[in-house]
Image: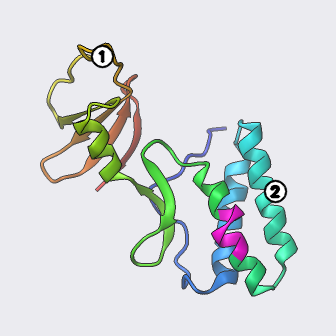
Amino acid sequence: MSIRTPRIGSVCSADPNDWPAVAHDFAYELRQFIKTDRDPDRRRAAMSAISEFEDAGDDPEALQAFVEGSGKDALQAYCLPFMSFSSAPSGDYGFWPDIEWLEYCAQSKDGVIKVNAGDAWPPLWTSSGHEVQFIMEVNDHGNVTLYNRRRREVWSCV
């Protein structure tokens, strides 16, 4: 069984003001993550959020509280580095790359190096002794792939 990780993109396409539909989608995603989660604290938080969803029943205010509170927080806990769970400008909730923060960390040399796709990677340590944890590879179309220091892809986006 492989461990489920978030994929960049929307997790629900419901009207963001349709709290029952959004809450249902959040609970579904959490249930999928729980199936393979090995982190007991994160799993416990996700199960607690699902219980809150189930206790809410058809109460729109309780469902809204779940979506804006424990449901969103529990999904955020599954994010990969430089990723967040939030609402996009379109209103869709999903897992989105935090390109601005990634760029900032690369510019400040805070554990991230930015390279052009196809170029050789520099040493994964800096002259100041700081280790590079992530490599941000950008191709000529602007697509970004984030790798960890073991050269394994963390996520990519177009």
Residue name at image x 26 percent, y 17 percent: 126
Image quadrant occupied by the C terminus: bottom left
Judge from the rendering whether residue 155 lies leftward or rightward of residue 121; answer left or right.
right
Q: Which residues are magenta?
A: 65-71
The image shows residue 146 at horizontal and vertical percentages of 34, 39
Image mark for residue 125: 1
Judge from the rendering whether residue 103 lies leftward or rightward of residue 97; answer left or right.
left
Residue name at image x 62 percent, y 86 percent: 18
Residue 65 visible in the current orientation: yes
Q: CA distance from mark 1 to mark 2?
A: 41 Å
Residue count near mark 1 (Cα–Cα under 10 Å), binned few <14, some 14–19, many ≥20: some
Q: Amino acid at mark 2?
A: Ser
Instruction: Tell me if residue 29 comes above or below residue 53 in the rendering.
Output: above
The image shows residue 87 at horizontal and vertical percentages of 48, 70
The image shows residue 30 at horizontal and vertical percentages of 69, 58
Report the residue marked by disc 2. Answer: 48
For mark 1, give the secondary structure: loop
Indicate yes or no whether the magenta region holds residue 67: yes
Going from N to C along the chain, the mark reached first, 1 or 2, is 2
Q: Amino acid at mark 1?
A: Trp
Residue name at image x 58 percent, y 86 percent: 17
Instruction: Tell me if residue 28 comes above or below residue 32 in the rendering.
Output: below
Indicate yes or no whether the magenta region holds residue 2: no
